[in-house]
Every structure is written in structure tokens, then in C-alpha cells.
Amino acid sequence: MTDIPVLEITNVEKHFGGLVALDSVNAAVESGKLTAIIGPNGAGKTTLFNVITGILPASAGQLKFQGQDITRKSAHEISRLGLARTLQIKSVFNGMTVRENLWIAAQSRDGVFKPFQRASKSKRANETADRICEELGLSALANQEASNLSYGDIALLEIGLALATEPKLLLLDEPICGMGPAETEQTVAKIQELAKRIDIVIIEHDIEVVFDISEDIIVMNLGQILARGTPKEIASNVAVRAAYLGDDDA
Amino acid sequence: MTPTKVHQLGIIALIVFTVAAPWVLPLFVDSFWVDIYSEMLIWSLLAASVNLLFGYVGLLSFGQALFFGMGMYGVAIGIAKMGLGFWPAFGFGTFLATAMAAVAGVFAVRLTWHYFAIITVVFSLIFYFTALSWKPLTGGDDGLPFSMPPIFTFGEDVKLSLTNTTIQYYFIALTVGLCYTLLAIVLRSPLGRAFRTVKENDMRASLIGLNVYLVRLTAFICAGFIAGVAGSLFAFFGRYASASYMFYHVSGEAVVWAIIGGVGTLLGPVVGTSLLIILREELSHVWEHYLLLVGSIVIIVVIFAPRGLGGLWHGLVNRLASRNDGTLDSSEETKL
């Protein structure tokens, strides 16, 4: 691994009118570690993801991905650099089949402005779509419209969309929110497996899961970074316990 | 029989009917229906242009008549004012419409939904009034008539021209057929899938790396091209151009044809356009308020069959197929 952090956030601010959603956030995400962001509702976690991925422009500050400035890049440009994400409110292409969903994400790497080529002849995108279907256990549903999938499968497909773009860094926004126990276990195992080859930053409310899988935890509150450290350090951090975990024994 | 086979049979039937129409139609109805059928084919392209934007990219345009009108004026001005021959005039009309779409598109596709619809209306109104008042060039209210140049001449005797009704019919049918073939090729390409992806979820599309703006702009220019070909053909068909075909009324009619025929299906616009033109031809001189009926049909279709007659047809074919072999095929290859 190189010395450059995979993601570098410097003095990033985001204002919505008078509301300060992100207040000079500084953080560097190291490669090779699974990083988690936790914090109460409204802490600015999703806003931070939105600013990183170009959905919202930063009001101030700088963002670097693998040493490259991405502060003013648009969402599709950032995606092409290899930064993928999932959304908190699960979102896939409902009217398309599972396979078509994954296919277009894979094809976006090779370009879509090919009006006279047959889509079904795109070898690489076809293979990628099939491989990810298999990897996520969605092969049996490959020809189903995404709108027919269960909630858990939609969440998996959304991770699949991100994977099909062959990312170097993957931002997951509450990937297991709303899943049953069995689905949660399966998805967590999947995330851990992915973390071995892709850098992952995860926003998650399930503290047990976070402490279980992450090596580096960032705690946010009121648009600022409150604390950062290993799960052990965070569990014993007094400020964190006051703001987030509650005062009584954790 | 698989759904794909059924759809292929449907297309073959449509092609056979179109080829045979000049002989078959006069056996059953008055021979002017051959002319009306070529008119339907032309207008269906305008509906196809609405359908490409609304059904495949999710942009509802009420201004496609602008590009239709540009095609018409391109041909008429090319022939009457610039002395162009048949093919250069055809090319000029189509080019003018496509270029207009590129210019309007740069501004329009920044917006979506009602704002997009409004800006397309505004664009077409601007050019409608321009065409109306720029009398020396466009003929204003009176329109701009021209005399038909030959398609092809060889020496003194061999001359091919649209003044021959059979040649005119086949020229129109062939050109319209080529446009639908082109459309089918594009819709099956990676670009066509990108259109549908953007329609489904533009935010998600940008997050997987699609340049949503550029995808929409490309679709808008393609739609302008199709409307332009339709307008050029209609100029040849009527031997004149008129600003009235640029009015947003005409755009609105194309939206209705597309919705009734079925947005998001390739040949839905042909069905919708044909049906409503038949209604107009048969009912308008019997009952002057026949548009009440058209309105009612639109309301019923929008509520009970939001994907139009094309959507009903697909549902039916898929249901019959799944009854036969128990599988449901929802892949795009069958959605013709």
C-alpha cells in the first residue's frame, strides 16, 4: 500500500442556508482498514458522503481521492475514478432486471455512447454482471425486475451496483438497515470479505456490528468529528459515551 | 411460442401490410386511405420522437413540433428560396431540425419534469411566432409552397419524382421504416440502456458513472432528428411548409398519440397515431365535438393502462407465454 491516504478530507464545510451540516471536517482514510462512521441522527454522516461523492458541492474545504483533487468534480466523474457508494434509502433501477442493473453499472466503465453496438454483445459487461450476480447469490433472480425483489435483495443489488463499477473505495450508507438477523449476518460476512480487496467506509447504526467489523471508527456529532480511534479506544472515550452511547455502562 | 417470436410476427405483419397497402387498401376502403396511411406513418414518427424522450429517457416534451416545423421549413426554404434539389433539401430540413434540437437541448435538458415541459413549449412558441412574422422567408400565414423537384433523373426521359403517388407512398414508407430500424438499433445499444437507466433513477445513474446530462442531451438530439425527418417528409407530402405545424397544439397531439399507443414501446406510436387519425377521419365530419371522445380515451388509458395499447399488448403476450412455459420474460429484448 502507498503512503497517500485513499481519501483525504481537509476542512470540509457544508452549509444549508444558516444550518451548518458539516463544520470543518478533517479526516484521512487509510488504505487497508475498514473504517466506520457512527454518530447520532443529524450528525452529518450522510451529508459527508454526499459531499465526497459529488451529490452536493462542498461549501468550503478540499477533498482528495488517492491524491487527486475531487472537490469540484461531478458525481459521474468521481464514480469513474473508482469511488462508489450505496444510498441510505435503497435505490436501484426498479424497471430493469437484476442483470440489466449490474450490466449498465459495469458498462459505464467502457462508456455507453455506442449507439450502433448491440448491448448484449458487450462481453466484459456481461461477464461482470454474471460474476457479481453469482458473488451476491442473486443468480436465481437475474432475470427478475428489480421491483420484484425483497428488501434484503435490493440492498444486496445496490452493493452489487457499486461493485460492478470496480471501485477502489466503497462508501456504504447503512447497508444492513432494515434487514432481518439472517440477512444481516450474511451481508456483514460479505462486507468483511470485500474489505480484504476494496477499501470500505461504512456508516452504520448497529453498534455491535460496527465494533465487530471495523478497525477504525470515526464518531461524528453536530457536523464535527468528535473522536476517532480503534473500537477499544472509542468504547472507553468519555465524550463519545456522553454524546452517543449514553452515560450508563456501555 | 416465445414472446419474442410473437412480437417478431407482429412486426412482420405490419411490414407486409405496409408494403401491400397501395393494392390492398383500395379493395376494402376508398383509395384516399392510402394517402391517409402515409400521413399516419409520418405523424407516427413525431409521436416516436415524443416516445423516445418520455418513454425511454423520462423527459416529457411539449415542443417536438418545433423540430417537425424546422424539418418542414428546411425542405420548403431549401427548394423554394435556395433552389436546392430533392436530396439536399431533405438533408437540409433534417439537419436544421437536428441542429435546433442541439441548441434547445443544451438549455432544456438541464431541467426535468414540469420545468422541462415548460421550456420545450416556450422554445416552440418563440419559433412559431418567428416563423409567422418572418414573411419574406417563411411566407407567414400563407405558408411556403414549392414545386416538387425530382428524386432522380437520368437523361431526358427517366425521371423519378414524388408526384407519382406510388413512388411517394413507398418513399415515405421506406424512410419511416428506416427511422424505426435506426431507433431499434440505438435502443438495443449500450446508449439505449443508458437512456432507460437515466429514466429509472437519474441520481443512481450518475453514481454509477453515467453523465446524465450528456445522455439526456443525446436523446434530445436523436428525438429532434426523428421529428425533423417527419417534418421533412410532411413537407414533401403536402408540397408546402406552414407555421401552424410548429404550434404546441401539434406537439400536444403527438404526446397524446404516444401515450395512447404506449410509451416505452418501439411501435406503440404507430398504433396510437393510426388509431387517433382514423378516429379523426371517420368522426370529425359526423360529430364536431369528437375530441371529447379522444379526451375520454386518453383519461381511460392513463388511468387503466398507463403503458398504453403497446403495454397492454406486451402484458397479454407475456401472460400467454408464462401460462405456456411458466417463465416470465421481462428482458428488454422482447419490448419492441
Image (spheres, rainbow, N blue to C red):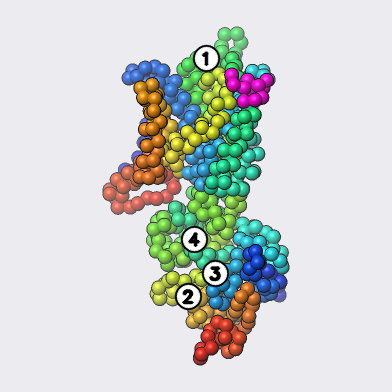
Judge by depth and name the residue closer to the eye, A131 or B223: B223
CB contact under 8 Å: marks 3 and 1: no
**How far separated are the C-alphas under marks 4 and 3?**
13 Å
Q: CA distance from mark 1 to mark 2?
A: 73 Å
The vertical placement of A249 against A22, above or below, is: below
Q: Position of residue A91 (x, y in %)?
A: 49, 60
Marks 4 and 2, the one that precedes in the sequence: 4
Marks 4 and 1 sit apart, C-alpha to C-alpha, by 56 Å
Which residue type does callout 1 highlight? Answer: Thr
Are discs 3 and 1 located on one and the same chain? no
- The chain under label 4 reads A
Q: Which mark is residue B163?
A: 1
Position of residue A15 measured from the top left corner of the image (x, y, whole percent): 66, 66
Image location (x, y in percent) of residue B252:
49, 35
Question: Which mark is first along the chain, 3 or 2?
Answer: 3
Q: Residue at x 52, y 34 (%)?
A: B251
Task: Let me know if marks 4 and 1 both belong to one chain.
Answer: no
Asked whether A168 falls inside the magenta stretch, the response is: no
Q: Write down the chain letter for disc 1.
A: B
- Type of amino acid under label 4: Ser
Badge 2: chain ID = A
Mark 3 — residue?
A172
Determine whether, in the image, residue A188 is placed left or right of residue B84. Answer: left
Q: Is residue B136 magenta?
A: yes
The range drawn in magenta is B132-143
**Res. A91 mark:** 4
Residues marked 2 and 3, same chain = yes
Residue A189: assigned label:
2
Q: As shown in the figure, which amino acid type bears the numbered disc 2?
A: Ala
